[in-house]
Image (cartoon, rainbow, N blue to C red):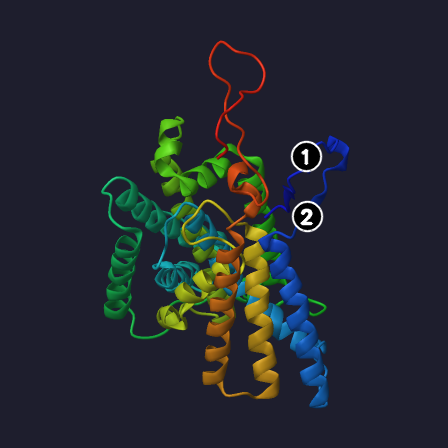
């Protein structure tokens, strides 16, 4: 989010040049400051145990964790900005891993066909989600959960184990690294950049913010709100489809049990931690990437220090609650209050009609 600028009320008779301005750090800035702080704490804790947090293996593991959740969280950002939600992303990841691997069938010449098929299925699921929510007026929580359960039932009945085969040429998407940086992380960053451009430089992005801010006002302004919601869900499912292809590349086969990884709730947590409001209308993909990075740093630190995974969940939950509480308090901006409610200010009585100059004898507010 951009940095907010608020202006303190000027004293009586003070020239405009004497008005003092103060800058308040936006939510995205807070996320990255928190990331730096958590990184420093992690470096110290790992160093006290005789380890090196920035060793190549540790950094590679951390970035690998970032890429998978990052794809899903970036997509989740679009729907949450529109005051919607998608609980089917975990099932879409599992389905797309199966579709991609079975279509490729171990043939290097069918890699492009597997990628297209997986992304087409993902886009179809997103289209169904968006239409059910925008046309049938079904609550996003219920709509996406229902679609996800339909996919789960299909996966559980048709696939009892791994399915399909991914050729070695595509497995590089999951394992190839440039130094300590996995190729999947580079692709995730590229997707994040495209998301930032979409939200900040295109009309569709502006419409998503408008729909999330107030759907009725957006509709009265001429925005096709249903189209924005459908687009957000299609983009969300496409990002989940890319994550499914990444799973297939890492496992060299499709995995129907990926939906048990908890990517749906983790992606929502990363989006909220990144400063996007669950009520929609405010947030950023850059903040979401920072939230994903924070969760990845925490997971990496706990693994290096061999800390009980149950305590990891407790600490992650506490951090998310604290972040949401902080963002909620920052929504109350004293500078946006009416002048008559500011300390030390009085509202001047209005002059009667047909007279010039200040009114006399009026009671002060």
Q: Can you name the residue that lies furthest to the top here?
A: 354
Front-lying residue, 72 or 46: 46
On screen, residue 212 versus residue 128, left or right, reads right
Instruction: Judge the density around disc 1: few (<14), some (14-19), many (≥20) Cα neighbours within 10 Å.
Output: few
Residue at 54% across, 57% down: 288
The answer to which quarter of the image holds residue 184 is bottom right
Q: Secondary structure at mark 2?
A: strand
Instruction: Judge the density around disc 2: few (<14), some (14-19), many (≥20) Cα neighbours within 10 Å.
Output: few
Residue at 31% across, 49% down: 129
Q: Position of residue 337 (x, y in %)?
A: 52, 42
Determine which of the numbered discs, if any, sits on residue 256 in the image: none
Q: Is residue 171 above or below residue 147?
A: below
Of the numbered discs 1 and 2, the one sitting upstream in the chain is: 1
On screen, residue 364 versus residue 54, left or right, reads left
Front-lying residue, 78 or 157: 78
Q: Position of residue 138 (x, y in %)?
A: 24, 48
Q: Is residue 17 above or below residue 257?
A: above
Q: Is residue 201 above or below residue 309?
A: above
Residue at 55% across, 43% down: 342
* Residue 337 visible in the current orientation: yes
Q: Position of residue 52 (x, y in %)?
A: 72, 82
**Residue position for label 2:** 23
Front-lying residue, 283 or 180: 283
**Residue position for label 1:** 12
The answer to which quarter of the image holds residue 293 is bottom right
């Amino acid at each position: 989010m951009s940095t907010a600028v608020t202006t303190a009320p000027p004293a009586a008779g003070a020239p405009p040049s004497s008005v003092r301005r103060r800058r308040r750090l936006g939510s995205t800035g807070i996320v990255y400051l928190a990331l730096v702080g958590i990184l420093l704490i992690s470096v110290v804790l790992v160093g006290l145990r005789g380890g090196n947090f920035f060793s190549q293996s540790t950094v590679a593991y951390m970035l690998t964790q970032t890429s998978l959740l990052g794809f899903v969280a970036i997509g989740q950002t679009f729907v949450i900005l529109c005051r919607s939600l998608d609980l089917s992303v975990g099932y879409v990841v599992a389905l797309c891993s199966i579709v991609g691997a079975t279509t490729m069938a171990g043939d290097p010449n069918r890699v492009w066909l597997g990628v297209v098929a997986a992304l087409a299925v993902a886009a179809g699921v997103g289209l169904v989600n968006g239409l059910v929510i925008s046309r049938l007026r079904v609550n996003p929580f219920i709509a996406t959960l229902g679609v996800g359960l339909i996919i789960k039932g299909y996966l559980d009945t048709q696939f009892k184990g791994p399915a399909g085969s991914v050729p070695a040429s595509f497995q590089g998407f999951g394992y190839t690294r440039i130094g300590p940086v996995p190729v999947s992380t580079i692709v995730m960053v590229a997707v994040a950049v495209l998301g930032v451009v979409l939200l900040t430089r295109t009309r569709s992005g502006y419409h998503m913010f408008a729909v999330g801010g107030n759907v009725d006002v957006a509709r009265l302004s001429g925005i096709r709100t249903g189209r924005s919601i459908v687009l957000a869900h299609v983009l969300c499912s496409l990002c989940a489809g890319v994550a499914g292809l990444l799973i297939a590349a890492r496992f060299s086969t499709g995995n129907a049990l990926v939906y048990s990884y908890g990517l749906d709730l983790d992606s929502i947590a990363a989006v909220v931690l990144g400063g996007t409001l669950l009520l929609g209308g405010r947030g950023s993909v850059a903040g979401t990437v920072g939230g994903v990075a924070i969760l990845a740093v925490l997971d990496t630190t706990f693994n290096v220090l061999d800390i009980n995974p149950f305590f990891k969940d407790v600490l992650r939950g506490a951090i998310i609650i604290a972040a949401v509480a902080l963002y909620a308090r920052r929504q109350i901006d004293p500078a946006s209050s009416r002048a008559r409610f500011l300390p030390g200010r009085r509202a001047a009585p209005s002059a009667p009609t047909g007279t010039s100059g200040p009114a006399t004898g009026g009671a002060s507010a």
